[in-house]
């Protein structure tokens, strides 16, 4: 009876390890000759933030301060 419990517990540990190792944020660059932009996508809850544009307008403060404008 100990072997099935060990298999179930190891399955949960593997699933938790995969969940914790995936990055939460994804940076999406939209190259365009007229209006390039950088978006930050939160994979946990689906929030999208506009991080950088060529004009520097309408960007959100939720993005990293290290991110440079175009």
Image (spheres, rainbow, N blue to C red):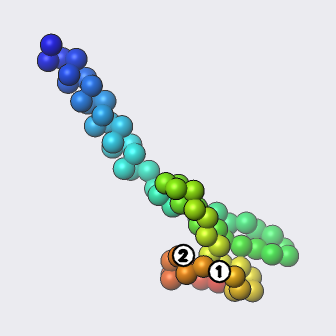
Q: Helix or strand or loop: what does disc 2 sit on? A: loop
Q: Which residue is mark 1?
A: 59
Pointer 2 local density, CA inside 10 Å: few below 14, some 14–19, many at least 20:
some
Q: Would residue 40 appear left or right of 36 to someone viewing this image? A: left
Q: CA distance from mark 2 to mark 1?
A: 8 Å
* Image coords of residue 34 (percent x, y): 85, 76
Q: Helix or strand or loop: what does disc 1 sit on? A: loop
Residue at horizontal 65%, vertical 73%? 50
- In the displayed structure, would residue 69 be above or below residue 36? below
- Relative to the observer, which residue lies in front, 19 or 34? 19
Pointer 1 local density, CA inside 10 Å: few below 14, some 14–19, many at least 20:
some
* Image coords of residue 39 (percent x, y): 64, 68
Q: Is residue 9 visible?
A: yes
- In the displayed structure, would residue 37 be above or below residue 18? below
Asked if the residue at tag 1 contacts the one at tag 2, i.e. Cβ–Cβ closer than 8 Å, the answer is yes
Q: Quadrant of residue 16?
A: top left
Q: Quadrant of the N terminus?
A: top left
* Image coords of residue 47 (percent x, y): 57, 62
Q: Quadrant of the C terminus?
A: bottom right
Number of numbered discs: 2
Q: Would residue 29 appear left or right of 33 to someone viewing this image? A: left
Most extreme residue toward the top is 1
* Image coords of residue 42 (percent x, y): 53, 60
Residue at horizontal 52%, vertical 56%? 45
Q: Which residue is mark 2?
A: 63
Q: Would residue 48 appear left or right of 11 to someone viewing this image? A: right
Q: Which mark is residue 35?
A: none
Q: Is residue 70 visible?
A: no
- In the displayed structure, would residue 59 be above or below residue 38? below
Residue at horizontal 31%, vertical 30%? 11
- In the displayed structure, would residue 70 be above or below residue 47? below
């Amino acid at each position: 009876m100990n072997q099935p419990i060990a298999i179930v517990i190891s399955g949960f540990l593997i699933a938790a390890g995969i969940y914790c190792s995936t990055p939460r944020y994804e940076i999406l660059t939209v190259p365009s000759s007229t209006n390039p932009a950088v978006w930050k996508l939160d994979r946990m809850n689906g929030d999208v933030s506009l991080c950088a544009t060529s004009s520097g307008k309408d960007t959100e403060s939720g993005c990293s301060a290290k991110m440079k404008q175009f």
